[in-house]
Amino acid sequence: MLILARKINESINIGDKIEVSIIDIRGDQVKVGIKAPKEVKVFRREVYEAIQSENLIASKASKNLPTIDNLLKDKKDPAE
Amino acid sequence: MEVNTKAYGKIDIDERQIITFPSGIPGFESLKKFALLDAAQQPFYWLQSLDVQEIAFVMISPLLFKPNYNVQLSEQELEELNLSEFPNEEALLFAIVTIPENQAKMTANLQGPVIINKHTKTGRQFIHSDVQWKTKHYILDELASVRNEAC
């Protein structure tokens, strides 16, 4: 991994279309500004991990599916 | 052709039901071939791995309980699925459903919509850029409120 030291207001170019700037540093938090073309998706690493882990849970579903109508009925009449 | 499914054991499917996920599905990156099946219980679908019988996802159309849900795809994402635009008649939109032991608490993942090009039979799970969509939306709660509004 390439590691570069940067100060506030300094930036890094990735290729000629992506610019990453350090906007602010406070304690253990860094604010990063990203300029990138629309076709480049930028998202927090946790978002991808959240989808991965949700998929892992979803894949373990029981093969016996409920029907939505029954579940909605139960919801309406919890006593039954 | 015959395939082994988690829900129905060995069944015969049409080749047109086979969908390729070139990048796999996050968490299952090595699995590329799936079969799209109508579940016996409406309105669910199964996305059944053809490589591993035990891996199958339950899916639902998110528009059933979130009529205002939409996905904006970048040009690159459209290209990956060979779509000129989205929404599009060629494209199917699904959300993966997580069903816990208490099935009434089932959730849909609207942060990671699955889109399938019906024509090329390719699919992909995207990451939604809009933070209002989470990995867990309670389907029954949402459905109940949609139906109440309709009454």
Image (cartoon, grey):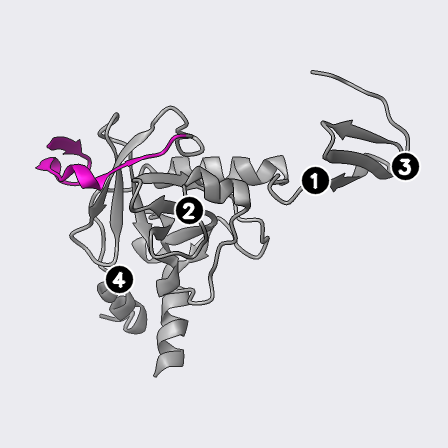
Alpha-carbon span between mark 1 and mark 2: 23 Å
Q: For mark 1, does the 10 Å Cα neighbourhood hold few (<14), some (14 to 19), or many (20 or more) residues?
A: some
Compare marks 3 and 1 and give the one earlier in the sequence: 3
Secondary structure under the numbered disc 1 in the rendered image? loop
Measured as percent of width and height from the top left, residue B28 is found at: 39, 29
Residue marked by disc 1? A36
In the image, the segment drawn in magenta is: B1-22
Write down the chain letter for disc 4. A
Image vertical order of residue B17 relative to residue B53, above or below: below
- Identified at 17% across, 36% down, the residue is B15
Secondary structure under the numbered disc 4 in the rendered image? helix
Residue B125 visible (yes or no): yes
Alpha-carbon span between mark 3 and mark 4: 53 Å
Residue marked by disc 4? A68
Please check the rendered image and state whether residue B113 is part of the magenta-colored stretch, yes or no.
no
Judging depth in this view, the residue of B129 and B98 nearest the camera is B129
Alpha-carbon span between mark 4 and mark 1: 43 Å
Is the Cβ of the residue at disc 3 closer than 8 Å to that at disc 4?
no
Q: Residue furthest top?
A: A1
Q: Which label number is shown at residue A9?
A: 3
Residue marked by disc 2? B83
Alpha-carbon span between mark 3 and mark 1: 17 Å
Q: Residue furthest bottom?
A: B151
Which three-letter amino acid code belongs to the residue tagged 3? Asn
A41 with respect to A51 (left or right): right
